[in-house]
Image (spheres, helix red, strand yellow):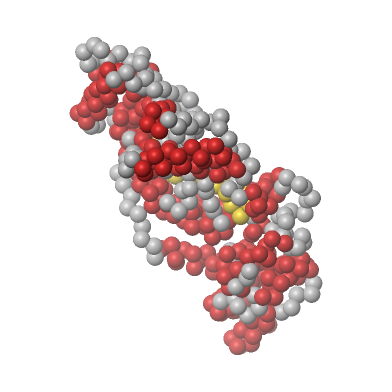
Amino acid sequence: MKLYSILNGFLKNSINFLNETSLNQKKMISTNLQINARVGVEIEGIFTILSFISPNIAFDVFMSILQNLQGKLPEKIISETIKIIKKQGDEAYKQQSYNQLYDMVDSFTRQNFTDKEQMYQFWEILIDAISIEEIWRIGEFDMNLLEQIPYVTDSNTEDNTKDQQYARSEMYKKLKNHNVIGKYIREVISDESIKLSNKNTQAKTFTAEIVTEPIPYSEIKQYLITLFEYLKKEFGFETNVTTGFHVNVSIDGKHDIDWVKLLMFLGEHHELLKYQRLFNKFTVPHIDAVTYNKNIPVEQQFNITEFISHVDANISNTKYSSFNTLHWKKEKYVEFRIIGNDYSTRINEICKSIDRYVYVMNIACSPTLFQKEYYKKLFKLYTNIEDNRKNNIQYKNLKAKIVNKFSWLTNIRLSPKDDDTTSIQKINQIRSWYDRQNIKMSKEEESFLREFEQIIKISKNH
């Protein structure tokens, strides 16, 4: 049995074992098992291609990496490899003492590679079992070394399109082969809406959207914890203002839904503010289309049935809303598009948000559940619309309301027609005015300015 294959098999198994042990020691987030739901996710992100880089392209760089790793692989990897050799190796290996085998394996990890194919094989073993981040930590390398590696494939292309496709394909293979994650991975696809924050890293990164199958609600939280940790370790998972995390929720046995009830219990503004997505064009809140709609009658006596009918008629059936209703008719699930922005380090908050979406979905699919609270929320919405009408507030949505408020107070009007430099100047002038007047901005106003700034930051890099 070849030593390469023994090492390869060992490293795959032992690293998986170590990862599972580490995960089992982590504190689990509580799960409400009483709601029989399924949750699918769509994860948009920016990832590193380091684990896919071909040594054939930068032989000298990879040679130096392997030489610097000599004698630095963990003791446990060597000792566990010996156990595998004893169990699976040829008879000649089994007859040797532990010390003899130790010297052989240790010598193997220290050898000088003069043959390109031999070096390539050993590199494949390493990156299949140990993350690039871990290799760099063991070898204490200078990250600038990576700047010498231009592409992931051997293709000579200027726009790295083929590299992006190759990287997504390899990512899919790695995710599907994972003993925990692979069970629910459906596909890894491109998403042109994702933009890189730093143009200089385009040759080293790729954008992707990871789509899962529906996952039982009882498993979703631990699955996402495992997935996020793996994505960070293996692919340098990052997010920015252009990335989103979509949550698709279905409730087993539920075939009817009250969209108004879902809207009343969801708390769109609260959730969108949490992820600074209140003013994102892909997550427009439904409540604004209702609150600032002058066609909803509120001058007459309050009638619950009629009011629900009017609100329901103004809930958008377009995709780019905080929750997308278009999948319900045929597939019986709701897509929540709220989570996003720089979310890769917010797994605990994401899990709480998923709890919220499942909870309100269950309420919206249960006609008799929380009816008294439902009516109270409806009446509050009715009075809000009535107050807006009396005060002649006819803004199309909250975004326009805030822009108008800034303009009225400071005589500075933000506009999408402004160039980036002008927009930044205006934002700074608005902040300075508030500071001089000793006035504190609302959460909505502050979130709006932060999101405006992030969009400018991204656009400057393209």
Q: Nearer the viewer, residue 127 or 434?
A: 434
Q: Residue at x 72, y 54 (%)?
A: 151
From what the image shows, is residue 443 above or below residue 85? above
Horizontal side, residue 27 vs residue 194: left or right: left
Count of marks, rendered view: 0
Image coords of residue 336 (percent x, y):
43, 36
Image coords of residue 234 (percent x, y):
57, 59
Image coords of residue 368 (percent x, y):
24, 28
Q: Residue at x 68, y 66 (%)?
A: 145
Image coords of residue 358 (percent x, y):
35, 39
Q: Residue at x 36, y 35 (%)?
A: 269
Horizontal side, residue 274 vs residue 150: left or right: left
Quarter of the image containing the C terminus?
Answer: top right
Q: Residue at x 54, y 67 (%)?
A: 15
Which quadrant of the structure image shows residue 222? bottom left
From what the image shows, is residue 404 above or below residue 455? above
Horizontal side, residue 268 vs residue 413: left or right: left
From what the image shows, is residue 57 above or below residue 81? above
Q: Is residue 172 visible?
A: no
Q: Is residue 414 visible?
A: yes
Q: Nearer the viewer, residue 385 or 213?
A: 385
Q: Nearer the viewer, residue 162 or 364?
A: 162
Q: Residue furthest top?
A: 300
Quarter of the image containing the N terminus?
Answer: bottom right
Which quadrant of the structure image shows residue 113? bottom right
